[in-house]
Amino acid sequence: MRILITGGTGLIGRQLCAVLKTQGHELTVLSRHPETVAAMCGPEVRPMSSLDEWTSDRVFDAVINLAGEPIVDAYWSEKRKQVLLDSRVGLTEKLVQRIASAQQKPTVLLSGSAVGYYGNGVETVLDEAMAAGHDFPSKLCTLWESAARAAERSGVRVCLLRTGLVLSKRGGLLGPMLLPFKLALGARLGDGKQWMSWVHIDDYVAMVLRLLHDASLNGAFNMTAPAPVTNTEFTQALAKTLHRPALFVAPSFVLKLAMGERACLLLEGQRVIPKRLESAGFQFAHPELEGALQDLLK
Ligand SMILES: NC(=O)c1ccc[n+]([C@@H]2O[C@H](COP(=O)([O-])OP(=O)(O)OC[C@H]3O[C@@H](n4cnc5c(N)ncnc54)[C@H](OP(=O)(O)O)[C@@H]3O)[C@@H](O)[C@H]2O)c1
């Protein structure tokens, strides 16, 4: 397949490119830094610096849309929120316009979203039928999804990737946690009761491949392992895997002071299950957290 990937230079995108290449697909990565694409994704991956390069006669069989400004990195001022929105919703709208004007349209668009769709601090077990929440991450995901869904009007199959906390040894959630935990400074966050809907990156990529190839699947999919854990359970599992104690607590008020509204990402969470992919028979290589951590940190 000829596949266009946005965000292909990111944590998930790089792993996805590596696997798609082994399957013989022809990859193009849209990047603000096209000169880095070869080093990040491989020399055979074609860089694209602007969607203007997608002329109406250029053919992509599939589009995977993962681009987005990092959500945790900076304080959520109104200006920052707009940057987060523009880099996801704005880019997705442009992508969908390109799809609509292509002479030969892709058959499928896989487009990013996050478990934040459901809002933070929800105790209920959440499958894909549950409603969106009301906080900023929820608004961001709702608008992002609705921009992608517009591609359905061009006859394109659209799958929305409601992504959980992707565990990878190359970065993401685990990256900044490893050093303090290795130094026996690992800490539970707040009361530790908040849910963490995690997924091993290999399972995540396998889910993306299933959605790419299975024409019977469309709509929203929770991209998480089937066994979410509380923050206390996550802290204990990581400490155990690294053979270190985790004796500390990062108090809620300190995190709220340091992070402002963003602290909801750490102190509140959601208990998400991948009901639709499991119903479709998807088998997880790493369904339990301890096994996933052992595999990643061995
Ligand atoms: N990793 C997770 O645990 C997780 C959880 C939930 C949702 N997600 C979502 O899944 C997507 C992929 O995640 P990831 O961890 O691979 O993200 P990542 O490592 O931060 O990479 C995202 C990519 O998006 C592009 N990007 C960043 N800012 C941009 C901007 N202002 N305009 C256009 N493109 C921009 C960058 O590509 P260039 O620099 O090459 O342009 C970057 O490589 C993201 O949208 C993320 O929000 C991830």
Image (cartoon, grey):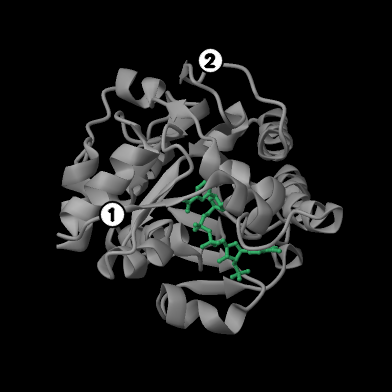
- Image x and y of residue 117, in percent: 61, 32
Q: Residue at the spot x=54%, y=82% of the render?
A: 36
- Image x and y of residue 3, in percent: 49, 56
Compare residues 290 and 276 and report the one nearer the observer: 290
Ligand 1 visible in quadrant? bottom right
**Kind of residue at badge 1:** Ala
CB contact under 8 Å: marks 1 and 2: no
Q: Is residue 178 left or right of residue 289?
A: right
Question: Residue 129 has which mark?
Answer: 2
Question: Residue 246 has which mark?
Answer: 1
Total numbered circles: 2
Q: Quadrant of the C terminus?
A: bottom left
Badge 1 local density, few (<14 within 10 Å), some, or many (20+)? many
Badge 2 marks a residue whose secondary structure is loop
- Image x and y of residue 244, in percent: 19, 60
Whether 56 is drawn above or below 34: the answer is: above
Q: Residue at the spot x=71%, y=33% of the render?
A: 135
